[in-house]
Every structure is written in structure tokens, then in C-alpha cells.
Image (cartoon, rainbow, N blue to C red):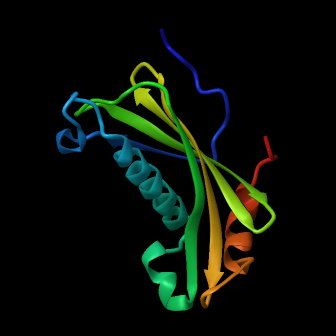
Amino acid sequence: MNAKPMRDYVFEIEMKARDYECDAQGIVNNANYQHYMEHTRHEFIESLGVRFDGLHDKGLDPVVARLTMAFKTPLRGGDRFRSCIDLYKEGIKFVFVQDLYRIPDNRPVVKAKVEIVCLTNGRLGDSQLFNDLFSPFLTNHE
């Protein structure tokens, strides 16, 4: 059965599950999916010309405030998958809808929502840098 993504995404990257990420059942340990999603967000930001590792030196710290994940199909070592991002803003939060799809059958692996807030010089608030950076990619709230 080939499942098709149900939405358009603002960013996608292909990755591969590594054997050492698997648990005793031979499937990717649940904690590693958070690593995949964080890597995808960093690659998205870098594709826009901003290095994540340089933000702290500028006094800007985007942090995860809330994360929800629904596991659909397990990955095994060596499986390739697409990590996809959609993005909208809710108040001062940037909400990343992050979905993973196994290749080649396009089966949903994980569906997640990651809420990011920004600390500017240690204070919670709106980030002009991210407002400007993400504005072309913001989609309507679901």
C-alpha cells in the first residue's frame, strides 16, 4: 500500500536510519525521531542562510516548548525516509508540523507538532529575525 503525503511542505530532506539507533526489537528507538526532526529544522534554517550554532552568540535561543508525536510505522536500520516541515505561527510560537515518510513506499512514520519559542538575551519574546526569516513559509493554521 502506497500512502501519499496529505499536504504540501515548505521543506523536505532525505535521511537514513542507522543501525545503532535501533533498540532490542530492531526498530529505531523513539528518542531518535526527535533527533531527526531537530536536524531537519536546523537544515531548514541553514537553507535560509542562517547557521543555528551562531544564534546563541547573537543572544537568540530558539527552544522547544512543546512536542507531540504520533508513531505510525516503525523504521529499521538502513531504512531511508523523508523528513518534512510545514510551519505556522501562533502568538509568539512558531509551530513546526513535522512528518516523516518511509522511502520508497511513502508510509507515514511519525506525525509531530513542535512548538518553538525564542529567548532573546534570556527573555521570552517575539523574534524579529525569525519573523522575517519564516514569513514567506508560514501557512494557515490547520
Query: Where residue 114 appears, x then y in whole percent?
Result: 59, 53
Query: Where residue 21 appears, x then y in whole percent?
Result: 24, 43
Left or right for 122, reference 29: right
- Vertical placement of residue 90 versus 59, above or below: above
**Closer-to-camera residue (121/105):** 121
Q: Residue at x 62, y 80 (%)?
A: 119
Q: Quadrant of residue 73?
A: top left
Query: Where residue 118 appears, x then y in whole percent?
Result: 64, 75
Q: Report the number of discs.
A: 0
**Closer-to-camera residue (137/89):** 89
Q: Residue at x 81, y 46 (%)?
A: 140
Left or right for 142, reference 26: right
Q: Residue at x 37, y 41 (%)?
A: 30
Which quadrant holds the C terminus?
top right
Q: Quadrant of residue 76?
A: top left
- Vertical placement of residue 36 versus 73, above or below: below
Q: Residue at x 22, y 37 (%)?
A: 23
- Vertical placement of residue 140 versus 43, above or below: above
